[in-house]
């Protein structure tokens, strides 16, 4: 992160990400807040690019904007009480406490980590290295995550399945 | 090969040469150079896109008319050539209507956001040997990821209209997009596994070096990619999201004037993007078996791209529309298992090829033949297994769709 271009890009992306993230919490309309969340995801992808993590950045766009945002949208649309506005926020205090805890942990980690040790070696392809590590050294966690996701899919199908013997469709 | 002119500024086989010469001649700082270079390249791509869309609006209408025994637009200008211009002017001059109760900001943002992915995709597409705006290492993934931005944009457009039909159409469009995105990814995954790179330029040069195109090696993946692409761009066998007779006009029902024009253009641009990626991955990109030394590579690329896009026009003129349940069943029960098998097969072939160390002249034809034969067997066998094709002569053959929705077999009792 030495040259001016990266620094400028970092500050622009950081401003976009943080600004949109504040908006997510502050905006009344739930769909607006999802739209802002998408902007946050996009800003994060930009930050990953400034860190030379091209694969992570693209996957961030693919998974978070293309899938997670849609999941949240479906959750909002399909939840009866969600409606169009989120005025009644009786969960305000627990949410604040949780947010404070997360923020505290992040700040602690940020100050505790030794950031000076590693230095980026420029923009090399990271996809191959990630693939090697995932299928070699971290094969077991990778497989466990896959099995977990698969069981979640099967569970979801089981939950929405109509009970009783299958009726023959006419 | 007498490559006398390669690299000179007047060598128009690579349009990057004159631009680089021009920028070098200015003698600026490297950062400014970079910005200028990107600006010129982006403007060139944008200009080409706009001109192509205008041309293909006319070509599509004329060709489809010819296929359906009509005349097509032939009043404005010679042979109706100015029809797209007239259309664009009409859209520009129309009153911009916003429905009451619409979410004004998101209503305005919808057409803008849907435009972004369709243009950004072309940043990684290699038009020629050095004619690529961003030569990313994860180019294939980038194309898929950027195309995924369309999904939330469709929802925002449908939701902000404050119209239940637009909302319903948006929901089913999203369901279709997500289902077929998986198939698209699996189809491209097979190609990436076989070549061993996600860089589009590397994929092109691999096909050039091994003297083959991926269509000959994995035809099933290409067919799946084109079908999934047809869903993404709402082309005719899959144009359920704007089925005129069922849904008013789909998620952009409430949009009029130039905002509707944006959606219309975005669909065309996405079509070019699909054709461009299919060309690059499966048809050898800007190479043509050595002919690219003589003909500009970008002309070869554009020729292939338009040929692939023509397939979409052709299918629009000939094929009837699927129902939504048929479309979803087709994705999840038919295409998905086939594509997973395809990925497994290709991975196994790569390993076997590496283990045996066969020469490419033996391995590639063998793999191609095996894949083509297996593709045919799998498609026919899996269709039979799901109940298609077995009930010939009995008036129905729709057990595949029977499990999903209500179907009345009109011909069953009569025979």
Image: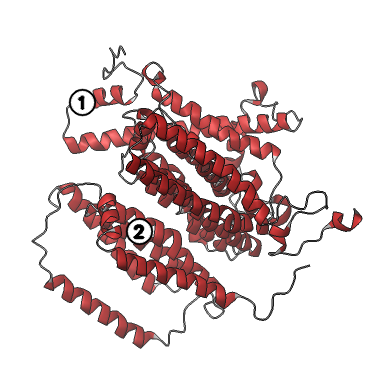
Would residue B92 appear left or right of B278 to someone viewing this image?
A: right
Which chain letter matches label 1? Answer: B
Q: In the displayed structure, would residue A115 be above or below residue B134?
A: below
Q: Nearer the viewer, residue B24 or B202?
A: B202
Q: Is residue A30 visible?
A: no
Q: Nearer the viewer, mark 2 or mark 1?
A: 2
Q: Mark 2: which secondary structure?
A: helix
Callout 2 crowding tier (Cα within 10 Å): few <14, some 14–19, many ≥20:
many
Q: Nearer the viewer, residue B373 or B35?
A: B373
Q: Residue at x 35, y 56 (%)?
A: A59
Q: CA distance from mark 2 to mark 1?
A: 36 Å
Residue furthest front as drawn: B356
Rendering coords of residue A134 (x, y %):
29, 59
Q: In the displayed structure, would residue B220 be above or below residue B302?
A: below
Which label belongs to residue B24? 1
Q: Residue at x 69, y 55 (%)?
A: B323
Which label belongs to residue A60? 2
Which image quadrant for residue B56?
Answer: top right
Quadrant the N terminus of chain B occupies: top left
Rendering coords of residue B106 (x, y %):
49, 60
Which image quadrant for residue A161?
Answer: bottom right
Rendering coords of residue B272 (x, y %):
50, 38
Q: In the displayed structure, would residue A3 be above or below residue B89?
A: below
């Amino acid at each position: 992160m030495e040259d001016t271009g990266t620094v400028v890009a970092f500050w622009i992306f950081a401003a976009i990400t943080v600004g949109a993230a504040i908006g997510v919490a502050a905006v009344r309309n739930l769909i607006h807040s999802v739209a802002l969340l998408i902007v946050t995801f996009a800003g994060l992808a930009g930050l990953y690019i400034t860190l030379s993590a091209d694969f992570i950045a693209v996957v961030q766009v693919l998974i978070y904007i293309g899938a997670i945002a849609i999941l949240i949208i479906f959750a909002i649309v399909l939840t009866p009480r969600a409606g169009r506005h989120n005025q009644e926020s009786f969960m305000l205090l627990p949410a604040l406490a949780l947010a404070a805890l997360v923020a505290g942990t992040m700040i602690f980690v940020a100050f505790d980590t030794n950031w000076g040790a590693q230095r980026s070696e420029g923009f090399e392809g990271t996809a191959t290295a990630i693939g090697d590590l995932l299928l070699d050294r971290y094969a077991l966690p990778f497989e466990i995550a896959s099995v977990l996701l698969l069981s979640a899919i099967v569970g979801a199908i089981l939950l929405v399945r109509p009970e009783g013997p299958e009726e023959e469709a006419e | 090969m007498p490559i006398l002119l390669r690299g000179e500024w007047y060598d128009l086989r690579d349009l990057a040469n004159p631009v680089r010469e021009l920028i070098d001649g200015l003698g600026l700082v490297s950062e400014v150079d970079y910005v200028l270079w990107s600006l010129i390249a982006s403007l060139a791509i944008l200009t080409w896109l706009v001109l192509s869309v205008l041309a293909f609006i006319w070509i599509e209408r004329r060709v489809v008319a010819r296929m359906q025994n009509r005349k097509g637009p032939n009043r404005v200008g010679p042979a109706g050539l100015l029809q797209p211009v007239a259309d664009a002017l009409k859209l520009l001059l129309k009153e911009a209507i916003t429905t009451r109760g619409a979410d004004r900001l998101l209503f305005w943002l919808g057409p803008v956001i849907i435009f972004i992915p369709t243009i950004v995709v072309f940043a990684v597409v290699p038009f020629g040997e050095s004619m690529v705006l961003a030569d990313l290492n994860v180019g294939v993934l980038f194309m898929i990821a950027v195309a995924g931005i369309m999904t939330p944009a469709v929802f925002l457009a449908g939701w902000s209209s404050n119209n239940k039909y637009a909302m319903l159409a948006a929901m089913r469009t999203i369901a279709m997009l997500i289902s077929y995105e998986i198939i698209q990814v699996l189809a491209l995954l097979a190609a990436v596994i076989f070549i061993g790179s996600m860089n589009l330029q590397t994929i092109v040069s691999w096909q050039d070096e091994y003297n083959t195109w991926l269509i000959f090696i994995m035809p099933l993946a290409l067919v799946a990619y084109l079908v999934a692409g047809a869903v993404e761009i709402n082309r005719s066998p899959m144009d359920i999201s704007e089925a005129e007779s069922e849904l008013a006009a789909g998620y952009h029902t409430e949009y009029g004037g130039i905002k509707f024009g944006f959606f219309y253009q975005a669909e065309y641009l996405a079509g070019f993007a699909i054709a461009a990626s299919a060309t690059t991955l499966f048809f050898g990109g800007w190479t043509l078996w050595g002919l690219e030394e003589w003909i500009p590579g970008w002309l070869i690329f554009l020729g292939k791209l338009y040929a692939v896009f023509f397939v979409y026009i052709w299918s629009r003129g000939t094929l009837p529309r699927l129902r939504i349940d048929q479309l979803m069943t087709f994705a999840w029960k038919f295409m998905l298992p086939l594509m997973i098998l395809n990925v497994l097969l290709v991975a196994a072939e790569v390993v076997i090829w590496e283990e045996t160390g066969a020469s490419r002249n033996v391995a590639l034809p063998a793999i191609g033949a095996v894949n083509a034969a297996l593709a045919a067997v799998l498609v026919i066998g899996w269709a039979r297994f799901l109940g298609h094709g077995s009930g010939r002569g009995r008036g129905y053959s729709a057990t595949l769709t029977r499990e999903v929705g209500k179907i009345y077999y009109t011909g069953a009792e009569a025979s």
